[in-house]
Amino acid sequence: MQIKLEPKDVARLDTFGNNKCRKCALGFVEGDTVLRIGARPPKYFHLECFKPY
């Protein structure tokens, strides 16, 4: 699922300790477009970092 992050989303990810891209390890900021994969716990990637093949 593709998500455009808002301030409340960034704060929520921060409290869960899941506020970094799994590929590039950079933190997420407001306005980033991220890809959410999985359910529990979900993995978040920057849209630019995630290439399936």
Image (cartoon, grey):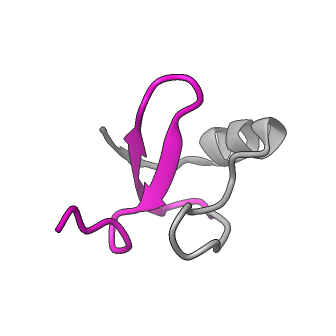
Which residues are the magenta region? 29-53
Side of 35 where 25 appears, left or right: right
Side of 39 where 27 appears, left or right: right
Placement of the N terminus among the 4 image quadrants: top left
* Residue 48 percent across, percent down from the top left: 33, 73
Side of 44 where 13 appears, left or right: right
Placement of the C terminus among the 4 image quadrants: bottom left
Toward the top, the furthest residue is: 40
Toward the left, the furthest residue is: 53
Labels in figure, total: 0
* Residue 34 percent across, percent down from the top left: 42, 55
Predominant SS along the magenta part: loop
Report if residue 37 lies within the magenta region: yes
Q: Residue at x 82, y 38 (%)?
A: 15
Q: Residue at x 41, y 42 (%)?
A: 36
Q: Residue at x 64, y 74 (%)?
A: 26
Say which of 28 and 36 sits in front: 36
* Residue 19 percent across, percent down from the top left: 69, 53
Q: Residue at x 47, y 63 (%)?
A: 32
